[in-house]
């Protein structure tokens, strides 16, 4: 249920705050870092489980990945496209918090696929900032960022290996 909750909240936030997210991207990243650090420091805080269990990061990855697909929600899709870069960066931040919370303690196949997807996403995260992106040719940057689809496959494999709940598996 947390997965649907975080997806719904993320979509609502994007719908209402897409322009401020884009305009104040640095503040958005700082807030993502603060929430992630707070979730790690205070696991009893209500939003902590959504971040520490990876639901918020995954929700943002899902939104970023599916925004390119033609859909009937044109208004929302335009708003997501407007902040796709910022969402990707925030998704990485939240996913890294999830990594720190869960993955550092054990190494299993599911953990390995999660770590590998994070390793693939790290250079993509670094090159998503506008100041770095300007140093690439557009075609080179796009080709490089196609690696994200491989990371999405690894994330999906990790979810399949970790999820024992049929409802969650159907959602993913």
Image (cartoon, rainbow, N blue to C red):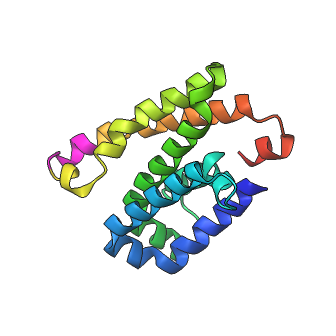
Extreme right residue here?
166
Q: Position of residue 164 (x, y in %)?
A: 82, 34
Would you say 121 lies left or right of 5 here? left
Q: Residue at x 59, y 68 (%)?
A: 11
Residues 85 and 72: in front is 85
Count up the numbered dots: 0
Q: Residue at x 36, y 71 (%)?
A: 22
Extreme left residue here?
135
Q: Quadrant of the N terminus?
A: bottom right
The reply to whether residue 85 is visible in this rendering is yes
The reply to whether residue 73 is visible in this rendering is no
Q: Position of residue 18 (x, y in %)?
A: 45, 74
Question: Where 168 sits versus 6, above or below?
Answer: above
Q: Quadrant of the C terminus?
A: top right
Q: Which residues are magenta?
A: 135-141
Assess whether residue 152 is covered by the magenta stretch. no
Residues 56 and 69: in front is 56
Residues 78 and 60: in front is 60
Q: Position of residue 91 (x, y in %)?
A: 49, 52
Question: Where 107 sits versus 51, above or below?
Answer: above
Q: Residue at x 64, y 51 (%)?
A: 55
Question: Where 60 sits versus 20, above or below?
Answer: above
Would you say 95 lies left or right of 122 here? right
Extreme top residue here?
108
Q: Residue at x 62, y 47 (%)?
A: 52
Q: Position of residue 169 (x, y in %)?
A: 77, 41
Occupied quadrant, residue 13? bottom right
């Amino acid at each position: 249920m947390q997965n649907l909750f975080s997806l719904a909240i993320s979509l609502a936030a994007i719908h209402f705050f897409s322009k401020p997210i884009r305009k104040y991207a640095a503040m958005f990243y700082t807030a993502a870092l603060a929430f992630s650090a707070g979730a790690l420091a205070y696991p009893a805080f209500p939003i902590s489980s959504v971040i520490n269990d990876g639901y918020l990061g995954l929700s943002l990855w899902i939104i970023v990945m599916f925004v390119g697909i033609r859909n009937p929600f044109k208004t929302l899709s335009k708003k997501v496209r407007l902040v796709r870069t910022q969402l990707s960066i925030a998704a990485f931040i939240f996913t890294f918090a999830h990594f720190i919370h869960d993955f550092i303690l054990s190494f299993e196949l599911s953990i390995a696929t999660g770590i590998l997807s994070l390793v693939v996403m790290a250079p993509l995260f670094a090159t998503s900032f506008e100041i770095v992106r300007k140093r690439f040719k557009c075609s080179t940057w796009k080709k490089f960022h196609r690696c994200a689809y491989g990371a999405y496959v690894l994330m999906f494999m990790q979810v399949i290996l970790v999820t024992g709940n049929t409802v969650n598996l159907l959602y993913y």
